[in-house]
Amino acid sequence: MHQRHSWADKFRSFLRHMYVERQIYIRSHGHVQFISLSPLTQTAFAAIAFVFLSWIAFASVNVVFKEQIIAAKDRRYIKMQGGYEERLAQLQSAYDELNGQLVITEERFLATTRQLEEKHKQLAALMSQRQTASSQLDTMRRRYAATLSGQNETASEGNTVLMRVDGASEGPDIVHTTARPERAEDLEPFVIDIGEGIDFAGLAGSGEDDNAVVSLIDTRLAQIDTAQQSLINNVEEVTDRRVRELKSIISMTKVVDPEEMLERTAGDGGEAQGGPFIDLADTDALAGGGDESGFAKQLFRVSQNLKKMADLEESIARMPLASPLVSYRKTSSFGSRRDPFNGRMAFHSGEDMAAYYGAPIYAPASGKVTYAGWKGGYGRVIEIDHGNGFRTRYGHLGKISVKAGQEIAFREVLGKVGSSGRSSGPHLHYEVWFDGIVRNPSKFIEAGHYVFAKQG
């Protein structure tokens, strides 16, 4: 406080020293008047005069240097405008670059999706072809299973005695066609596992970085492509194995080469061909170039395999591979044997299957009845032409349920087991002929186990 008073006293002392009290005298009409000017009033007038003169000086400078000031402001404005325009240009360039990347990404994405869709259509066509190829044998398996089920029920209701033909060289050989031989697995179900689906709308609104979204989409598309490639690889492997299995089944009959059987089947159907259309030239133009060409060629190979598989299954479907009886006892095999009536060695042209009187006899394959009636030592006999050079004969029947010229479906009942003709007991004499030569029926039945045991 003392210091503040000291400064105030010094300031008042300075004002009193500089601005002593003055008086202004005014004479008017013989009268004299005066006006006293205190130091404070003089200070106020001095301050006002200083401000006024300063304003006049500032205004004078502005008037004199007006153009220079305006020019300086213009230069500053132009500089600011230039900086703003440069920033806008940078932003526009960045936007154009981003937009260009988005357009390229969109085109690449659309090309990839079109490619994947095309692959999917081709794979779907393959799956349809595969289903068609297997449908005939699957239907035959179901019919075979139905006859097994019905016959088993019938057999369980009665007391059946299977008679053995006297003089049979081998001991009693019990055969049940419901046996399950080991066989390779069928075609596995084909499933494309790509995990979770791609939610493009969710990705667009997720607020994530654009590069991260694009990378995620690319990753998911790559997963789909990998899954499709894995699928076609799996299909090719399985169809290759299935073709080998079907060829081995035909080879088991010991009567015909699988390739020859394929030619016979194709000959019956003219130039019958099928499968999805896969243009190898067009697929080169898809995104991926060489990779797509490789995929198309692989697809073509698989399609050819499926066609071959369908032809093989068609060939097998026409072969008499199923056993004509559900349950029987083999009492005499194909080949040389001692005759049960005169004891002399003789050639036995078929296989004797002992069963109970009235046991149903089923067609081992579809065909056409060429003979149904009595024929010498065969007794009541049926002969069926199955096509492709195959014929079957059924002797010693107790009853005939079909007539000559009748078309026969697979597992249709032909008649009943009996003991007509040159027979020592109820049984079926079963013969298989190929190209006019009698063959061993057991080879066909054994091969049939690998075809029909699945549904038995």
Image (cartoon, grey):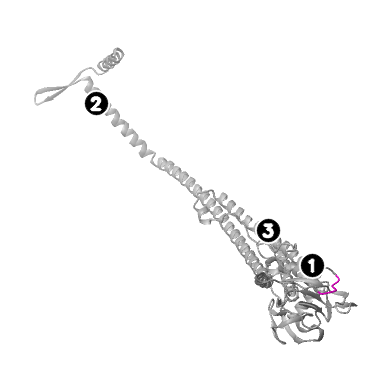
Kind of residue at badge 2: Phe
Q: CA distance from mark 3 to mark 1?
A: 27 Å
Kind of residue at badge 3: Ser
Kind of residue at badge 1: Ser
Q: In terms of image quadrants, where is residue 11?
A: top left
The image shows residue 124 at horizontal and vertical percentages of 63, 67
Residue matched to label 1: 248
The image shows residue 35 at horizontal and vertical percentages of 16, 22
- Residue at the location (88% across, 75% down)? 338
Q: Is residue 217 left or right of residue 339?
A: left
Q: CA distance from mark 1 to mark 2?
A: 129 Å
- Looking at marks 3 and 1 on the same chain, the residue that comes earlier in the sequence is marked by 3
Looking at the rendered image, the disc whose residue lies closer to the viewer, 3 or 1, is 1
Magenta part of the chain: 165-169
Q: Is residue 21 left or right of residue 149?
A: left
Residues packed near mark 2 inside 10 Å, few (<14), some (14 to 19) or many (20 plus): few
In the rendered image, the quadrant that contains the N terminus is top left
Residue matched to label 3: 230
- Looking at marks 3 and 2 on the same chain, the residue that comes earlier in the sequence is marked by 2
Q: In terms of image quadrants, where is residue 64?
A: top left
Residues packed near mark 3 inside 10 Å, few (<14), some (14 to 19) or many (20 plus): some
Tell how many labels. Answer: 3
Is 92 within the magenta?
A: no
Pick the residue in front: 57 or 456: 456
Residue matched to label 2: 45
Examine the rendered structure and indicate whether residue 121 appears above or below residue 30. below
- Residue at the location (65% across, 67% down)? 127
